[in-house]
């Protein structure tokens, strides 16, 4: 697997980091939280433990916002919000028996136009 870090100026004229990952065959690249921590540590030039605290704080703040029903908007990336799924009757795939699925709240992500364009341009 070959990783290339590319720094370009996004539409908002701030420097953004774009990583292109080259994969072979059926293997796919996976971005892990540890990768984010490593990137923050390198870019901000802080120890890995401090970068881990920063990343955890960001994720915890996002989870708290979603739990309270707030919308998270990251310009140039996308929006996170919650949606209500109503109760329904499902089927057990093994037995075919009807199963009641209760109503629940789910996290939903809608990518921004800029992110869609970046992803589209990387695939072509």
Image: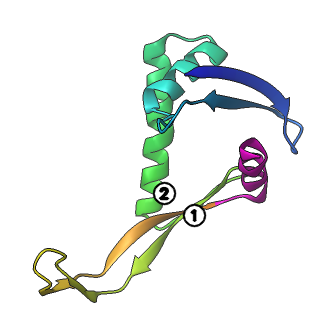
Secondary structure of the residue carrying tag 1 is loop
Residue found 72% across the figure and 58% down from its top: 112
* Residue 80 image point, x, y percent: 56, 60
Q: Position of residue 60 (x, y in %)?
A: 43, 43
Q: Position of residue 113 (x, y in %)?
A: 77, 59
* Highlighted range, magenta: 111-124
The residue pinned by badge 1 equals 71
In-image side of 24 versus 91 (left or right): right
The front one of 122 and 67 is 122
Q: Measuring 50% from the left and 25% from the top, which residue is drawn there?
A: 35
Residue drawn at (43%, 34%) of the image: 56
Side (left or right) of 29 relative to 97: right
Residue positioned 52% across, 19% down in the render: 38
Left or right side of 40 for 64 = left
Q: Report the front residue among 87 and 4.
A: 4
Describe residue 95's horizontal placement relative to residue 29 as left or right.
left
Q: Main secondary structure of the magenta part?
A: helix
Disc 1: CA contacts within 10 A as few (<14), some (14-19) or many (>=20): some
Q: Which residue is mark 2?
A: 65
Residue 56 colored in magenta in the image: no
């Amino acid at each position: 697997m070959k990783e290339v870090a590319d720094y370009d100026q996004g539409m908002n004229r701030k420097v953004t980091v774009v990583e292109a990952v080259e994969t072979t065959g059926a293997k796919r690249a996976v971005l892990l939280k540890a990768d984010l921590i490593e990137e923050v540590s390198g870019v901000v030039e802080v120890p890995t433990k401090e970068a881990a605290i920063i990343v955890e704080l960001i994720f915890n703040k996002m989870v708290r916002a979603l739990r309270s029903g707030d919308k998270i908007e990251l310009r140039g990336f996308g929006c996170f919000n919650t949606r209500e799924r109503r109760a329904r009757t499902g089927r057990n795939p093994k037995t075919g028996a009807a199963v009641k699925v209760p109503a629940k709240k789910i996290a939903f992500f809608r990518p921004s136009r800029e992110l869609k364009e970046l992803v589209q341009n990387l695939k072509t």
